[in-house]
Amino acid sequence: MILGLETSCDETAAAVVTADGSTLASIISSQAELHARFGGVVPELASRRHLELVVPVVQEALREAGSALDGVERIAVTRGPGLIGALLVGLSAAKGLAWARGIPLAPVDHLHGHVASLYLGDDPLEPPFTCLLASGGHTLLLDVRERGGFVVLGSTLDDAAGEAFDKGARLLGLGYPGGKAIDDLARDGDPDAFSFPVARVAGLDFSFSGLKTALLYAVRGLAEGELERRRADLAASYQRALVAALVRQLQAAREVAGHGAVAVVGGVAANSELRAALPDACFAPLDLCTDNAAMIASAGRYVEALEAPDYFELDAYASAS
Ligand code: KG4
Ligand code: ZN
């Protein structure tokens, strides 16, 4: 059994996963409400909340798995990228647990974790495949040839796709996080009502900042009081443009990588229009799209675990290397 810990942003999460990829428990305590009134995650608040929650969340995961800490053979923990203070809470907790039990510690890259969400359950995806990783912090195209890692084919030059959803939602006066809110509202809107262009970037990269600006101008161009009436149309048109860019670049990456199979992971993989636009793609299950610890435990199966005292020196990292 592997105990996974995830504290890179605003979810405090712990999970118990078996070596063959069954999830025995997955507990996620979201801080979204805590940060909502600030319109985004406040790093210092996140660290403090992780500190309060990390032990109870681990206890709850063990209880749900019907296990004591004695049954755990390895700890897997997110080392980065993410908020440094938030990461340090999880990493320190993991070191303490591993040291107390004399078991090894596997440091996991959060992005590898998102990809490893595809390796859980009864019907796991087998590499090779081309993968779109779209979350609040990252938008990457990956060539995945083995479960232990990936090669980056392209990434965003400015905002991440989830960030573009969140910023768009803010312009439309929807809450944070905004991806789900836009997704829900777009169902009642006309995606052709507004024409939002997405920058065509050479190669396999993305750019979403121009789209966000286009939405800003569209909102500003509305007559007084008209936003309320056009909000769903704006959401639908904005989402249409975002999804089109993601699909276009994923198809291009698929041709470059030369794999038949494609997959989509990360928070934005929960988007209903994206899922509908790629009927052949393998999507992470909905509960594994946004941040969770089961995906971290899953990735922890494929990275080298460290023994004490080697893991004492492990440090967190804020950005992807
Ligand atoms: O993977 P994740 O939980 O956190 C990061 O690692 O960043 O992704 C969170 C992002 C947020 O930007 C959120 O707005 C977006 O995923 N998201 C969605 C949907 N659900 C979550 N975006 C579009 N449609 C959704 N249904
Ligand atoms: Zn994430």
Image (cartoon, rainbow, N blue to C red):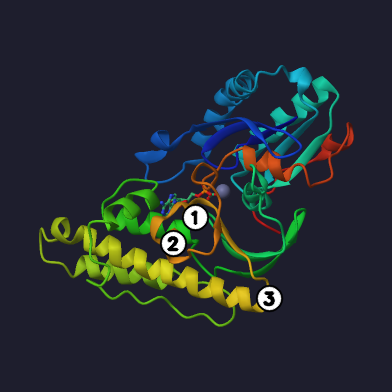
Mark 2 lies on residue? 274
Q: In which image quadrant can residue 212 be found?
A: bottom left
Residue occupying the point 51% across, 45% down: 290
Q: In this view, does 20 lie to the left or right of 133?
A: right
Q: Which amino acid does label 1 sit on?
A: Ala
Q: In which image quadrant can residue 145 be found?
A: bottom right
State the residue in front, 164 or 71: 71
Mark 1 lies on residue? 269
- Provide the secondary structure element on which disc 1 rests: helix
Mark 3 lies on residue? 258
- In the image, residue 34 sits, relative to residue 205, either above or below, namely above
| Residue 286 place in picture, x, y as percent | 49, 46
* Distance in Å between CA atoms under marks 2 and 3: 22 Å
Say if residue 147 shows up in the picture. Answer: yes
Q: Disc 2 vs disc 3: Cβ atoms closer than 8 Å? A: no
Q: Is residue 11 left or right of residue 298?
A: left
| Residue 173 place in picture, x, y as percent | 26, 52
Residue occupying the point 41% across, 33% down: 34
Q: Which mark is residue 307?
A: none
- Provide the secondary structure element on which disc 3 rests: loop
Residue occupying the point 73% across, 33% down: 18
Label 3 packing within 10 angstroms: few (<14), some (14-19), many (20+): few
| Residue 116 place in picture, x, y as percent | 67, 49
Say if residue 78 shows up in the picture. Answer: no
Q: Which amino acid does label 2 sit on?
A: Leu
Q: Does the residue labelled 3 lie within 8 Å of ligand 1?
A: no
Q: Disc 1 vs disc 2: Cβ atoms closer than 8 Å? A: yes
Q: Which amino acid does label 3 sit on?
A: Gly
Image quadrant where one finds the N terminus: top right
Q: Earlier in the sequence, mark 2 or mark 3?
A: 3
Q: Is residue 172 left or right of residue 227?
A: right
